[in-house]
Image (tube, rainbow, N blue to C red):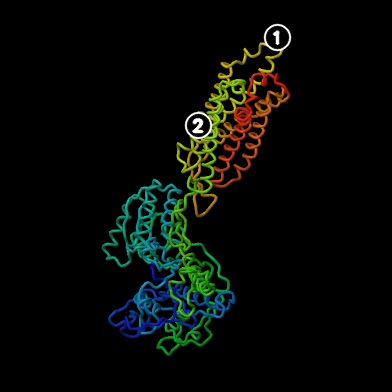
């Protein structure tokens, strides 16, 4: 799990006006290479157990009985040829990079001694000149580096990967431990960033799950024997029989061999992805101790055509590759040159005839990550070269210059979306480049926006108009038309209508806990007060007409005290409904992220939907009752137009709220609030205009009709 296990780079000519850096010594040549318009580089450890003397700069292998001490890593060789296979596929595909070809330069890290030199060679080509722009921060895509520390865009702006961060693996392993009921666990990691970062996240997550950690120790294969013995002794005398091992296959192999020699068994191992599926562990003495190990790894995949391609590999395809010749000789146990004591290769050797991990494609995990990395680079280049002017990602919509592509330009176009992804917090979302989380825009109905201004003006105008009518009625309170139908109810109705017009102001601005509770309860109570007054006036009209009949004494049963009591009682029922609603499950502010990806709708959730619809239902019940009574009174003498006006007002009121329900349910975001405000304003306006405007017209412009004789039907026609 090393950062430079795979380095994929776009190699392009870069002009330098002056020499900035000069290479000392000879250039490191790639083991596998092919020219192309763009070159993808790779660094792999083809040899295991190799040593180097830096001053001499050559591979030094101990020999024993004429056998090389180092061995080949079949998996690493497979990775290298997977790059070649993917590039051949892409070059044959006319849909990707038409009129352009990809090449490659693959280096042997020789057990890590040449890793830095290989990286520098890939970044700068084989010229002795290195420009300012590409001495550092070469764009890197890893198929194997999972350390969460590499996710920092600030520290590693040019590092990308096709494998998830260990942050997720570590937390998942903690949940796995919890799932099996293991609450007493030991923890071991190597001393590198991979192990230290991964085990630290695991321990934190495990403790959150209620798992206790008995110990946390570090172990590496190069530790002194005394340090390794100390770790073995800790495991031997520990009461924790479940061990989380966050290390590479090299360390776990050495560790279990030491445990095997001490006959320490009966341990349940939890493995990180670096070793949990590594088939080379079967070569260790203590591999039986790992039977039953559990862990997570990247999913397996199939790459069509890769198996036959690997079987056709032979040294003649790359005659300058020293490593491939040695690899061939190692697999077939023959010599391509005259070497004493070795059988000479006769040409009959073929990978089809042998079974090796190099040609095994039954479990392609990290190999698939290499494959995806190559395609990520190809698609990045393809998108970059397909850019259309004025639609590019750079300043003023410009595109990159195809003859002078820069490494960082590929990142902007594709690679940021092809690497390890970090999930943004709920209140954030990925920016258009996908390289950082930005705070989502919070949307709610504001006083300063156009819709908010219009609704606010309408609300205030309605309240102002109601106040003006109130003043007119108060000034003419002794006139017959005001006194005819219980002026007390009229003034109470005007007061409640004023509150109804002001209710929408609680719906505008940022929702809070108090505003959410106030807006719905204030609306419900004021509207019931309003409808109760209208209902009282309707009953007064009916009773007043019946009171004119001979022998009728009905008005004593519905006089002013009874009218006040009925309004109070009907309103009190709504108050009790609202109190019950606020007690059980009150409305509350809620960040709705379902409608839009890039913004949050801040709204008031109803809390109890039953409470909300009970409030509306009660208003609707009173409105229907009022409408029915007013409709029954429609045939009263013409001078009693009160019933007709109430009928029209209730008709408007019911029509508004019937259409409100589907509109309210289907409106998204702040438009839900706007629909509710519109319904409040429209229904309030209907009541105000139908009931009071005709009376104001008579008071102000037809004073001759504002007489007792006219109201009693005795005025001349």
Q: Is residue 429 left or right of residue 562?
A: left
Q: Is residue 562 left or right of residue 411?
A: right
Crowd tier of the residue under label 1, counting other residues whose Cα lies within 10 Å: few below 14, some 14–19, many 20 or above: few
Question: Where is mark 1, residue-wise?
Answer: 551
Q: Secondary structure at mark 1?
A: loop
Q: Is residue 699 left or right of residue 187?
A: right
- Residue 665 picture quarter: top right
Q: Quadrant of the C terminus?
A: top right
Q: Nearer the viewer, residue 689 or 560?
A: 689
Question: In the displayed structure, would residue 255 be above or below residue 80?
Answer: above
Q: Nearer the viewer, residue 186 or 432?
A: 432
**From mark 2 to mark 1, how far is it between C-alphas?**
52 Å
Residue 529 seen: no
Residue 116 position in % (x across, y down): 35, 75
The residue positioned 64% from the left and 40% from the top of the image is: 659
Query: For residue 584, which numbered disc appears in the image?
Result: 2
Q: Nearer the viewer, residue 209 or 464?
A: 464
- Residue 307 picture quarter: bottom right
Q: Tag count in the figure?
A: 2
Residue 283 position in % (x across, y down): 42, 68
Residue 240 position in % (x across, y down): 36, 50
The residue positioned 39% from the left and 54% from the top of the image is: 267
Disc nearest the viewer among 2 and 1: 1
Residue 111 seen: yes
Crowd tier of the residue under label 2, counting other residues whose Cα lies within 10 Å: few below 14, some 14–19, many 20 or above: few
């Amino acid at each position: 799990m090393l950062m430079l296990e795979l380095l994929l780079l776009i190699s392009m000519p870069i002009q330098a006006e002056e020499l900035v850096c000069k290479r000392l010594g000879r250039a490191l040549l790639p083991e596998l290479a092919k020219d192309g318009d763009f070159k993808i580089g790779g660094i792999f450890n083809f040899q295991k157990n190799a040593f180097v003397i830096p001053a001499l700069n050559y591979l030094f292998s101990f020999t024993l009985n004429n056998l090389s001490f180092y061995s080949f890593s079949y998996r690493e060789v497979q990775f290298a040829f997977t790059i070649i296979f993917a590039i051949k596929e892409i070059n044959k595909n006319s849909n990707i990079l038409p009129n352009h070809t990809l090449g490659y330069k693959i280096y042997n890290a020789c057990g890590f001694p040449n890793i830095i030199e290989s990286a520098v060679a890939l970044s700068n080509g084989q010229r002795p000149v290195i420009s300012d722009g590409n001495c550092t921060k070469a764009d890197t895509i890893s198929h194997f580096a999972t350390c969460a520390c590499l996710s920092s865009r600030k520290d590693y702006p040019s590092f990308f990967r096709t494998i998830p961060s260990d942050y997720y693996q570590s937390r998942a392993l903690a949940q796995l431990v919890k799932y099996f009921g293991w609450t007493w666990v030991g923890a071991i990691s190597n001393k590198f960033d991979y192990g230290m970062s991964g085990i630290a996240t695991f321990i934190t997550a495990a403790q959150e799950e209620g798992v206790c950690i008995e110990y946390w120790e570090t172990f590496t294969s190069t530790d002194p024997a005394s340090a390794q013995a100390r770790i073995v002794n800790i495991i031997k005398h520990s009461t924790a029989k479940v061990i989380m091992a966050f290390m590479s296959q090299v360390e776990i192999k050495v560790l279990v061999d030491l445990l095997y020699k001490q006959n320490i068994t009966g341990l349940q191992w939890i493995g990180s992805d670096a070793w949990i599926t590594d088939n080379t562990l079967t070569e260790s003495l203590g591999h039986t101790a790992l039977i039953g190990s559990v862990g997570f790894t990247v999913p397996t995949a199939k790459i069509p055509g890769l198996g036959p391609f690997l079987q056709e590999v032979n040294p003649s395809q790359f005659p300058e590759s020293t490593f491939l010749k040695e690899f061939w000789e190692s697999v077939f146990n023959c010599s391509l040159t005259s070497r004493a004591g070795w059988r000479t290769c006769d040409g009959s050797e073929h990978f089809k005839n042998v079974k090796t991990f190099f040609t095994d494609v039954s479990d392609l995990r990290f190999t698939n990550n290499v494959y995806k990395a190559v395609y990520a680079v190809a698609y990045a280049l393809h998108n970059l070269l397909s850019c259309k002017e004025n639609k590019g990602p750079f300043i003023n919509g410009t595109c990159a210059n195809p003859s002078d592509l820069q490494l960082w330009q590929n990142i902007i176009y594709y690679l940021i979306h092809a690497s390890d992804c970090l999930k943004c917090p709920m209140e954030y979302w990925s920016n258009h480049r996908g390289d950082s989380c930005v705070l989502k825009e919070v949307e709610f109905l504001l006083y300063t926006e156009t819709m908010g201004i219009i609704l606010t003006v309408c609300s205030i105008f309605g309240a102002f108009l109601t106040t003006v009518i109130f003043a007119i009625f108060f000034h003419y309170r002794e006139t017959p038309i005001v006194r005819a139908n219980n002026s007390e109810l009229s003034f109470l109705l005007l007061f409640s209508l004023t509150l109804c017009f002001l209710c929408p102001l609680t719906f505008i601005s940022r929702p809070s806990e108090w505003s959410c509770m106030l807006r719905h309860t204030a609306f419900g109570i004021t509207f019931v007060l309003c409808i109760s007054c209208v209902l009282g006036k309707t009953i007064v009209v009916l009773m007043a007409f019946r009171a004119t009949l001979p022998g009728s004494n009905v008005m004593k049963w519905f006089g002013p005290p009874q009218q006040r009591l009925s309004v109070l009682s009907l309103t009190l029922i709504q108050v009790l409904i609202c109190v019950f609603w606020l007690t059980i499950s009150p409305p509350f502010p809620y960040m709705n992220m379902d409608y839009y990806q890039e913004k949050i709708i801040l709204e008031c959730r109803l809390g109890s939907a039953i409470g909300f619809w009970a409030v509306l239902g009660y208003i609707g019940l009173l409105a229907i009752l009022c409408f029915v009574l007013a409709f029954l009174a429609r045939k009263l003498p013409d001078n009693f137009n009160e019933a007709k006006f109430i009928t029209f007002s209730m008709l408007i009121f019911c029509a508004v709220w019937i259409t409100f329900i589907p509109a309210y349910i289907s409106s998204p975001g702040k438009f839900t609030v706007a629909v509710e405000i519109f319904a409040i304003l429209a229904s309030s306006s209907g009541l105000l205009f139908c009931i009071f405007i005709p009376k104001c017209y008579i008071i102000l412009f037809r004073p001759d009709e504002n007489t007792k004789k006219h109201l009693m039907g005795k005025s001349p026609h």
